[in-house]
Amino acid sequence: MIAVLWMALAFAQDSVRPTQPLELANVYRNARERSPRIAAARALTDAARARAPSARRPPDPQVQFGFMNYTLPGLRPMDVLGMQQLQVMQMLPLPGKLRLAGRVADASADAQAERARDVDWEVRSKAAMAFYDLYVTDRSLGIDRETLRLLQDILRTTESMYRVGEGRQADVLRAQVEIARMVQDTIRMTTMRSAMAARLNAITDTPAQALIGTPLLPAFPDSMPGLDGAIRSAVADRPMVRAGERDLEAATAQTRLARREIWPDPTIGLQYGQRSGMDGTERMGSLMIGATLPVFARSRQLRMRDEAAAMQQMSRADLTAMRAETQAAVAEAYSNLTRARNLATLYRTTLLPQADAAITSAFAAYRTGAVDFMTLLDSRMSLNRYRKELVELEADEGKAWADLEMLLGRELFDPSSAVARGTSGRN
């Protein structure tokens, strides 16, 4: 049975064997260059920028060309009255309207640009989460494989002790059961790795079957930023909050513009006409001045004011909610970072050394018959569990840093740096 499991494990490992180590900086670069969401957000920003200049321009002039007073059905100009006519009309918005409309368009474009930046950081954070999940899986697989080798050593020891009459057959069978269970767990985690690699590939628009190397844990900063300073920085610099500020600016300008919509906009027209007279071609011109009449002001212009005021109120409430949400998110990320760092330090300095010493002592005592097999096995499994928990804490620290970077809108450490292999808890 164990031989069959080993064959299945070897097949699963060959199907997902990584090509080369994977750095977090490469993940970020691929996400920035290939993510469809980032490309869509940038295109939407370009579209908003392209719309902005037209907001400061008056409506296009109207040009009309006509044949006046022609006979029917002959279509000949009537005597004295028949003529050809050219007319140009231009509506001129009152001073201030185009300026306010331009401010609305520019602020809306700036808001979209900030939202595009927020998408960049959101995709970056999502890629980091997938990267650290993959790191946990790979490191846990490495720990399980190392544990498998140690369990094989324990199995050989129990078998040799059983052959010379110093051990029990139950110990041999229990060791075989633990090896089988560990092989099954390794096969399951190997399959999970394929799914996590596919999730990371999806972020960078890469084929799901593309092989991904083993993630390298980056070197995190030695010190943490102050919580109060981080909250102030996030509230001031987070792209989503800045987008909310630009939206409020646009809504405020739109409210001022809506109050001017009830003012009539003048229209100026020039007209040129010519006809054939007794003394040759007769030419004439006309100047026309008009204005829009807000005859439906109660149901149109005044309702536009109400709409703009409501949108301004909504933008202000959204901005307040964004700031409160950002403060809470920073505090949560800071708490997660503190927890992960403190617990990881505890594991490296206390739990892991003690567990490692306990298994060394238990293995030596088992050889002499001072302890039973279950004590030895429990010591080995406890060490295995502590090492996996440390790996998860390292990943949690990385995720907390990624959350803080997204909230602050800036890098907090170099993602291309990697922890040297062989350091405590990260080997």
Image (tube, helix red, strand yellow):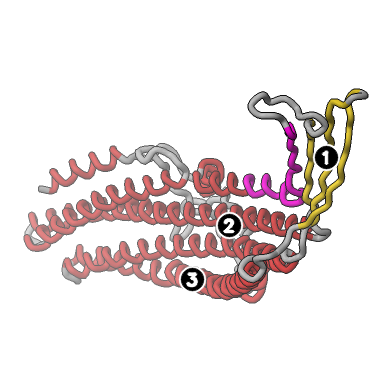
* Foreground tag (1 vs 2): 1
Label 2 crowd bin: few (<14), some (14–19), many (20+), radius 10 Å: many
Label 2 belongs to which residue?
118
**Mark earlier in primary sequence (1, 2):** 2
Is mark 2 in CB contact (under 8 Å) with mark 3? no
Label 1 belongs to which residue?
271
Query: In front: 185, or 353?
Result: 185
Count every numbered label the image shows and give the total: 3
Q: Amino acid at mark 1?
A: Gln
Q: Residue at x 27, y 63 (%)?
A: 380
Q: Amino acid at mark 3?
A: Asn
Q: Secondary structure at mark 3?
A: helix
Q: Residue at x 34, y 68 (%)?
A: 355
Q: Quadrant of residue 105?
A: bottom right
Q: Which mark is residue 320?
A: none
Q: What segment carries the magenta color?
A: 46-69
Can the viewer see residue 323 in this picture? no
Can the viewer see residue 261 in this picture? yes
Q: CA distance from mark 1 to mark 2?
A: 53 Å
Is mark 1 in CB contact (under 8 Å) with mark 2? no
Q: Secondary structure at mark 1?
A: strand
> Measured along the vertical axis of the image, is residue 299 above or below residue 99?
below
